[in-house]
Image: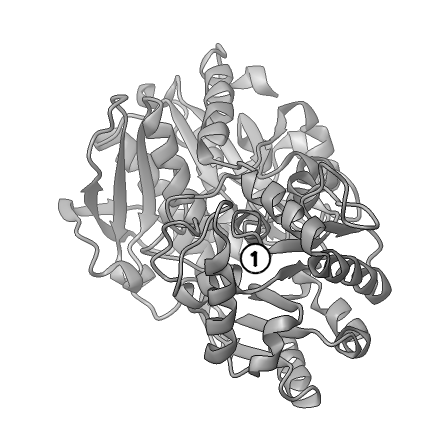
Amino acid sequence: MVSSEVSPWAKSGGLADVLSALPAALAGIGYKVGVVVPRFLSAAEAPARRVIWSLRIPMPSGDQEIGISEMASPATVAGGSVTVYFIDAPKLYGRPGLYGDKAGDYPDNHIRFAVLARAALEVSRRLFPADIFHCHDWQSALLPVYLRTRDGIDPHFLAARTLLTIHNLGYQGLFKASQFEDLGLPRSVFRPGAFHDGTLEFWGGVNLLKGGIAFADAVSTVSPAYAKEIQTPEFGFGLDGVLRGRGEALTGILNGVDYASWNPESDAFLPARYSIGNMAGKHACKRALLGETGLPEAAIDKPLLGIVSRFATQKGFDLLGEAAREIFRDDVYLVALGNGEPVWEQLFRELQSEFPGRVGLRIGYDDALAHRIEAGADIFLMPSRYEPCGLNQIYSLRYGTIPVVRATGGLDDTIIDAGADGNDPAGTGFKFADYNGKALLEAIRRACHAWQDRKGGAALMARAMRKEFSWTAAAEQYSVLYGGLASRKNPGDSK
């Protein structure tokens, strides 16, 4: 597996959690997994040993000198294992941010992640012979391109197959046409044309993700619904035609969650534990959360809405702004944790100012507080414009915190609407389809009504808490996909 993130050593979002949990789940069914990631500053203290001290990666802008460090996990009962390989290159990765700083994205990101792809091939050549290269998002999307244009004639890679997983199509690795020469690829892969011509060209510029989609043997994304959505103009971000062209090679596999970390029966971050059979601890968690976020004690008997999120346009917070006055007129409270785009950070500050004593806000990221919001809130909001998979709605289910979500992507796949009165016997949350504040408000009101119905609300919470989205199921589906790739006679069979 090749990625820019892995928890806890490099994390900006859910990708890091996937790269921590999925390899372990695969190891649990017998796979040997190598995870190749940059050694960012955040991983400086990782207990890894240097196994290759100096290796030159030739690049047109100048050779890049890297080292490789190894951190192995214990072998599992099934005989599998996970080994993390850090690419040590301080000039490229020893910076304050993963992808940029306050001034914006680093201007040499195309080189930084081209080197990651080339280094991953060297890891396979020298340390970890790989049958499958499983690449994640645009940061590793050049690996299939290099493998089929530069390294494919190497006997070491003749049987290797590639899978590219798209975690969020909104991020594609876009660069100027002049930067293509820095990648060390043949000019033939940068020209206008249909996707099957194998081109990285995109509206006059370079699109790394497009190249990965074109050259990978298979493409997957993180929920079945999202796999369909990204083939439409509404959600395709300009690549819907490319993805429709590869429709036969495109699969949606729903992410799992790590219930060892996200479980109210054992969560070390909570002031009290609880379970389906004994929910008293959830009430204690709510009381503690109100105190921690500066909300009044009177809120204990009112619906408490929770948000833990990147503050990004994708997440639908404009709908919250549209509906806020009506939402707070219903005597509810809100706790929000996150950071991101200044416009949405400012929106939450304005809500806190306009509705004093009703909004608890923490700008930034605090993992422990995220757990306490999941446990202490009554209702969890995810009104996303689009959502490839989403994890917090799944965490919310396990914590008995009823999700209110827009019916898109993984949110639609994981939440069953509880109906107008909240008593649908299969329901686990509340969904809305239309992207507007009125639809969000109506869904919140349905959730609040269900929460206030003691008997019906308790049954809804119990159904939610029984839902299972473990990584074991996802690992089995990936295993089937890997097996199909490995059985192909040659890379051309997938095109």
Image location (x, y in percent) of residue 466: 55, 39
Q: Amino acid at mark 1?
A: Phe
Q: Secondary structure at mark 1?
A: strand
Residue 340 visible (yes or no): no
Image location (x, y in percent) of residue 489: 48, 10
From what the image shows, is residue 216 above or below residue 120?
above
Residue at x 68%, y 40% (from the top left corner): 226
Graded by Cα atoms within 10 Å as few (under 14), some (14 to 19) or many (20 or more), the crowding at tag 1 reads some
Q: Which residue is mark 1?
A: 175
Q: State left or right for residue 256 relative to residue 251.
A: left
From what the image shows, is residue 243 above or below residue 343?
above
Q: Quadrant of residue 239?
A: top right
Image location (x, y in percent) of residue 22: 41, 37
From what the image shows, is residue 105 above or below residue 410?
below
Residue 131 visible (yes or no): yes
Please name the colour scheme applied to the rendered image.
Answer: one colour
Q: Count the labels in the image.
A: 1
Which one is in front, 200 or 182? 200
In the picture, the quarter occupied by the C terminus is: top right
Image location (x, y in percent) of residue 420: 84, 50
Q: Quadrant of residue 273?
A: bottom left
Residue at x 38%, y 29% (from the top left corner): 26
